Image: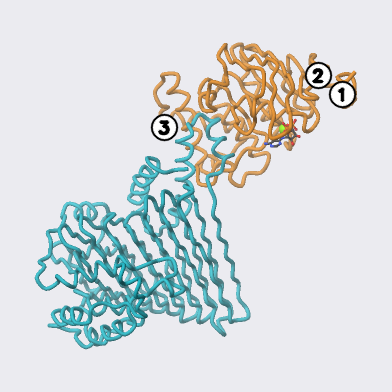
Chain colours: A cyan, B orange
Amino acid sequence: MGSRSSQRMSVISLQPDALSRVVASLSGETPSELRQRAMQQFIKRGFPTTRDENWKYSDLSNIIDISERWLAQADDAPLEALDETQIREIQASIDATWLVFANGHLHEELSSALTTAAISVTTIDDATDISIDEPLADLNAALMTDGIVIRIGENKRIEKPVGLLFVDRAASRPLTSHARVVVSLDSGSSARFIEYHASSGDANHYSNVVIDVTLGNGAELDYVRIQNRSRNHSQTQRLSVRLGKDSSIRHFGIDLGGVFTRNDLNIDIVAAGVSAEFNGLYIGSDKQHIDNHTRVDHRVGPATSVQEYRGIISGRSRCVWNGKAIVHKGADGSDATQANHNLLLSKHSEINAKPELEIYADEVKCAHGTTVGQLNDNALFYLQTRGLDRQEAKRVLTRAFATTVVEKSPIVELRQLIASQLEARLDELDDGDSA
Amino acid sequence: MLDITNLEVRTGDTDILRGLSLSVKAGEVHAIMGPNGSGKSTLAQVIAGHDAYEVTGGSITFNGNDLFDLEPEERAREGIFLGFQYPVEIPGVNNAYLLKAAMNARRKHQGLPEIDAFEFLKLAREKMATLGMDPKFLNRGVNEGFSGGEKKRNEILQMAMLEPRLAILDETDSGLDIDAMKAVAGGINALRSPDRAIILITHYQRLLEYVEPDFVHVLSEGRIAHSGDKSLALKLEEQGYEWVREAASA
Ligand SMILES: Nc1ncnc2c1ncn2[C@@H]1O[C@H](COP(=O)(O)OP(=O)(O)O)[C@@H](O)[C@H]1O
Ligand SMILES: [Mg+2]
């Protein structure tokens, strides 16, 4: 890596030969055309670097390194055995229809049959409309192992959550995985989705998950993303949601694990009457890096978008929140609210929080607020005078800070699971590095 | 029960208490009055253990034990309760949760098992009814969005549930209408017993019409400038604090 930084090539891509070899081996079946196109685009543009405004604080060097080493060994590397107990435990924690992506491959045995009269499941082919306009999405399209299209039929209301479980295990060699899911909710339908990220193994992994969602007229989607990866895991994740007339989404994402995490959430409002609510919580400790970039495009009004992200940042961790709202010309009646609150528990931790509003329409309502603070001393003292010791008082306040946004998670059955994972996470903070 | 001897307290460069002495025995109700800024809240906060204040001299013992050896939470578990002049809002922490945690911390210290969930609810509802509080307040964030009067009632609710040995109520009566005042006074009177003591910090003698104190003290110039019985409160109401100051500096 030293040589790379000293040379500072203008484009940092992957070895084209090695990349084409792997892409060719994956292209035995469709979508070969799409893969080739995406690969060429990726080679030309390369990975984002910290010189890109959107990647200023998130350095992909380590991910590039894992990818290079993975490419060098890719053809003769058999898949490593999965940790099935971990998978079964996650599946048992909530009654959902699970699709399991293990090291990027759809794992039929661990997955439930999803296809019903209301839901169709197919694989991505050259005709599938998927986004390949951004380097990591291009890389994903070139290297995707299994790409799945899930379609909820018109006016169908799916009660049981659909769980997308992305699980990776790398025990002896570096691993990368590129899973892609396309979801479409036809008009008048409703569904609930869980996107769950887990991993295990001592070797380094990098997963690059891309999910494209389209909501038809009046469709309703509840969506919860849980990222609880191991500390050997780096990930980039992109969720793009295109919202049709009168459709709505309620989203909540929580980041607990991983060593490097970058999430991109893109909300694209293309018709009137849309309501988009997206919230999140990130908890950093040790040397974790957690970056949440959100972007909402109000192209047509009236429509409402509301977001609140909260962060608990401790140890030597660094978190990034960047929330962009763009109200395009003519999108009158747009109402965009963004809030980001951070609890900084250690003087060695760091938060880069930035709201961005770009308004090109006349009649809009926009508000944003960002705070960074410590635990409130008066509240700590108040709790102590009620008999709680200082450590417990800190815990109560930290939990309360998180709970305020966790309560906005739209899938009620997941609250218990999230609460217990949150509790386990707070234990880790108490042990080491609370201020 | 509580013995304060020559207490000196400062914060930053300011001396607030300058040799304050006060002795409170079980069964007694003491009222402490005094002009704004005379140090009444400081005294209460120091007894509760706030670390923003530096104790530069004197001592406080509670049932013979040096209070300065104890953390705020240990003082609470020993049975000291402070009703705050400005109760703190804690969004996201459920009122019932805090009440229960506070009771259990005290009970654990006393070697008692945790309170049964059903018993707790029953007791809380009962106390809330006598204080004229809607049971819905149990499920709200601690003091979150409460009006001034609701916050004060909530402090009294905590006191009633915790049954402290020493209750210090810092201006619990200010900002209350007459009904709220009566409810709060009822809560305080219900706590009166031969093995408990109560210190009422107040501006007005109005509360003292409902809760009759055994002693009334005037805090001025950082010490107890004057002590008497409840008639002293009346005199202060009529004549103000000027004469105390003059007498103290004479
Ligand atoms: N935390 C603090 N920091 C600085 N000054 C303080 C603090 N607390 C109290 N004081 C000052 O000490 C004096 C006494 O205040 P206080 O005890 O609140 O009086 P009272 O309750 O009698 O009105 C006032 O002059 C006040 O400004
Ligand atoms: Mg005061």
Q: Which residue is mark 3?
A: B117
Q: Secondary structure at mark 1?
A: helix
Circle 2: residue type? Ala
Cα distance in 3D space between marks 3 and 1: 52 Å
Dot placed on the residue nearer the N-terminal end, 3 or 2: 3
Q: Is residue A419 left or right of residue A107?
A: right
Crowding near the residue tagged with mark 1, few <14, some 14–19, many ≥20 C-alpha atoms within 10 Å: some
Q: Is residue A222 left or right of residue B129?
A: left
Q: Position of residue A156 (x, y in %)?
A: 31, 72
Q: Chain of mark 2?
A: B
Dot placed on the residue nearer the N-terminal end, 1 or 2: 2
Q: Which residue is mark 1?
A: B245
Question: Could you say which is closer to the camera, residue B129 or residue B227?
Answer: B227
Vertical order, B12 against B198 (above or below): below
Crowding near the residue tagged with mark 2, few <14, some 14–19, many ≥20 C-alpha atoms within 10 Å: some
**Marks 3 and 1 close (CB-CB < 8 Å):** no
Q: Residue B60 sits in which quadrant?
A: top right
Q: Position of residue B75 (x, y in %)?
A: 54, 23
Asked if the beta carbon under badge 1 is closer than 8 A to the nearest atom of ligand 1, the reply is no
Question: Could you say which is closer to the camera, residue A207 or residue B113?
Answer: A207
Asked if the beta carbon under badge 3 is closer than 8 A to the nearest atom of ligand 2, the reply is no
| Residue B225 - label | 2
Q: Position of residue A10 (x, y in %)?
A: 37, 80
Q: Is residue A421 left or right of residue A143?
A: right
Q: Residue A3 sits in which quadrant?
A: bottom left
Cα distance in 3D space between marks 1 and 2: 8 Å
